[in-house]
Amino acid sequence: MSFLPKMLLSLLALCAALARADAAFLARPDVQRYIDEQVAAGALTRPELEAVFANVELKPNIIDIMDRPSTARPWYQFRPNFYSERLMGEGVAFWQANEDALRRAEQQYHVAPEMIVAIIGIETRYGGNTGSFRLTDALSTLAFDYPRRAAFFRDELTELLLLARSENVNALSLKGSYAGAMGLPQFMPSSFRKWAVDFDGDGHRDIWNNRVDAIGSVGNYFQLHGWLGGDDVVVPAEVAPGEALDKLLADKFNLHYSVAELRAMGVSPLAPVRDDAKAVLFALEVAPGETRYWLGLNNFYTITRYNKSTLYAMVAHELAQEIRNRYLAARFAATPAP
């Protein structure tokens, strides 16, 4: 037997194995229960669901990724990954190419253009890396083979299928990250259904290919999560050591205290800030063994609603400020002298 027939037989055997695997997934009792629940709820029809699950390919490598131990990096190691020349340059170019949409988003949602630009840059490098997993595969794997968070991912799988129906797209065609995040801003399906907008008015909310919709969707998300246009994000602070400091740092992302109350507990802002402003104290290791402190204000809290990480929120703020500085400098340089 020649090499070519052997290879052909191997490919046919692989295809047959995949077909059996797909059929086996659809027949699984837990999948059938999920289908029954959705049909009973009136959300989706049995033919719709069976058409999707008959074509799902489970991705066990996703479980391996989810179960890898997470090692928190200090700020001085985390920051260079995003506060980089590449993202700054690409951010200015993205702003210049989408000035009208960003200006309109600022007018409608009162969210600074640089913040929208920074978020899209951090999430996907302005669409350069939106994820290559079929979302039906990723979310089905996590919904049915990842017990620790199965309930969350089953809800997101349902949201994805409802999204596909409302947007009149094939659910099997949608791609994203291994955890189910989608498009330029990396919305989860539930976030898409709640906060994505058709910002260009073409009748579709397309955050995968349509930069205008992605910009409007991030602006809408930030506004509805409490962004205050024109307000500061953070101010540096000095602190008095002691039990009060430990308690305040343990508060993480919560705005439980006013600046005046924090002053009374030994926190001294190093920049002007209203006493009645709500704030949270946080610390960052800026160099090995060197810690500095900041007060995160309302807009800092809003960024942590997008990604629940102090490191993320701080680097998004810093990147946004540098992109703004460079964008304005480039615009000034291009303005003809009178």
Image (cartoon, rainbow, N blue to C red):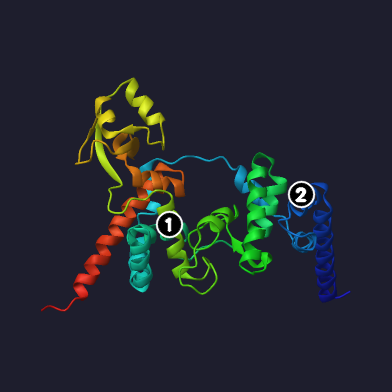
Tell me the residue at 40%/40% (across/down): 74
Decide: few, some or many residues near mark 1? Use Cα within 10 Å; few <14, some 14-19, many ≥20: many
The one nearer the camera, 276 or 234, is 276
Amino acid residing under circle 2: Glu
* Res 16 → quadrant: bottom right
CB under 8 Å between discs 2 and 1: no
Q: Which mark is residue 37?
A: 2
Residue 168 picture location, percent across and down: 64, 69
Amino acid at the residue labelled 1: Ile
Q: Which residue extends farthest top? A: 243
Q: Which of 250/161 is in front?
A: 161
Q: Secondary structure at mark 2?
A: helix
Residue under the image location 28 percent in, 57 percent down: 322
288 sits to left or right of 156:
left
Which quadrant is home to the N terminus? bottom right
The circle on residue 122 is 1
Q: Label 1: state its secondary structure.
A: helix
